[in-house]
Amino acid sequence: MSGVSHDGEERRETPMAAKLKALIRQSGPITVADYMRACLSDREHGYYVTRQAIGRNADFITAPEISQVFGELIGLWSGVVWQLMGRPGSVNLVEIGPGRGTLMADALRAARIVPGFLNAATVHLIESSNVLRRTQETVLAGAPAAISWHRDIASALGRGATIPEGPTIVVANEFLDTQPVSQFVFHEGNWHERAVGLDAEERLTFTMLEAPDDSFEPTLGADYVAKDGDILERNSDMTYLGYAILMSLAEVAPFAALFIDYGHARSGVGDTLQAVSEHRYVSPLFAPGETDLTTQVDFELFETIASAPGRIAIDGPVTQAEFLGRLGIMERASKLMSANPGLANEIEVGVARLMAVPGMGDRFKAIGIRSAGLSPLPGFPPPRSSP
Ligand code: SAH
């Protein structure tokens, strides 16, 4: 998890950079969390707001875009989870951050073989980007289930929710890593929030807020002794709010969620903020608003938050390779290859990439969250027995 190498030199004068510089000149450095939020979601210049980021010819490619088998297995997973819930007459199938809509299109096609599931399911897509929403509308035009769109987790699932109460299945691939994190730097005996300011030549540079943050406490256990320059990351309040809403849902109705993301299983020291442009790593300060910014998901912290209320249970995290392997990816791929010999090579290469270790197969992890009354979710090993 230790740092990504940042070139630190090149800067592109993007419209977002100009806007941020004006802000910094006026009121001082902005926190890394605010920088990330602005670069990704600024209404004028935000990365997800203005562009088509995902795909073979875009900045980065995701599992559902690599192989149709990924979304198909998640569709079957959802159908089996619905069966585990006792086949309720109606169920919300929610996807957060659906990208190009590919995962859901593949999932719904595959889920047709689970009798009764698609009659019970209403699909809800939570998407903040208008550009991506339009793509999703096109890709899902002929889908075999009713679909509605929502702008954010709080309005979709929180108080006064636009998604009706009741049994709910949530899936999200590569969503958590786009959520802004706060970073803290240890400096001469104190923790300071890490920030973006201006250097002597008026270029964006990493710095820290002058006043120490006395409320910040590392959660790395008693053995951890902070050294000058250590960086720790924390989910933002908004992310906590999102989690809290999901957790409260699990307490009132049968609920299951699946998050698959790039991350580490144990919390640690290090800066994981990274930027990707045209499939290459660049400095997070290189072209604000025009590169994808992500951090690695800290699954340990996620587990701690998720298990707080007590009436929910956690499955995993396990590696993506283990999760997909348990769902039968190899069997599904070989059936698909014999049914479509012309596509056999493409299917084989795609599946190999999703399962590669080292590679996507172990860098990505799957974690399940469910109402404690439900059996363990498919794809995960039986829960560890309590000590
Ligand atoms: N799941 C897709 C896309 C991953 S990219 C795939 O695997 O290909 C992240 C997605 O989350 C994009 O669709 C982005 O627009 C969306 N997103 C980011 N932050 C969001 C937020 N706060 N609320 C809703 N959607 C968000």
Image (cartoon, rainbow, N blue to C red):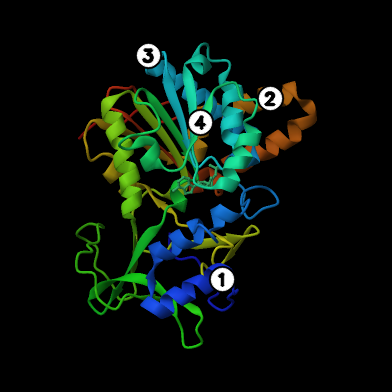
Name the quarter where the N terminus is drawn: bottom left
Q: Earlier in the sequence, mark 3 or mark 2?
A: 3
Q: Residue at x 64, y 57 (%)?
A: 279
What element does badge 4 sit on? strand
Q: Which of marks 4 and 1 is nearer the N terminus?
A: 4
What element does badge 2 sit on? helix
Residue 64 is left or right of residue 172, and the answer is right
Residue that label 2 marks = 336
> What is the spatial separation of the Cα atoms under label 2 and label 4, in whole angstroms?
30 Å
Which residue is situated farthest in the bottom direction here?
200
Q: Where is residue 10 in the image (x, y as percent from the top left)?
A: 59, 77
Q: Position of residue 327 (x, y in %)?
A: 51, 27
Query: Mark 2 or mark 4: which is in front?
Result: 4
Amino acid on which disc 3 is placed: Gly
Amino acid on which disc 2 is placed: Leu
What element does badge 3 sit on? loop
Label 4 Cα crowd, 10 Å radius (few <14 / some 14-19 / many 20+): few
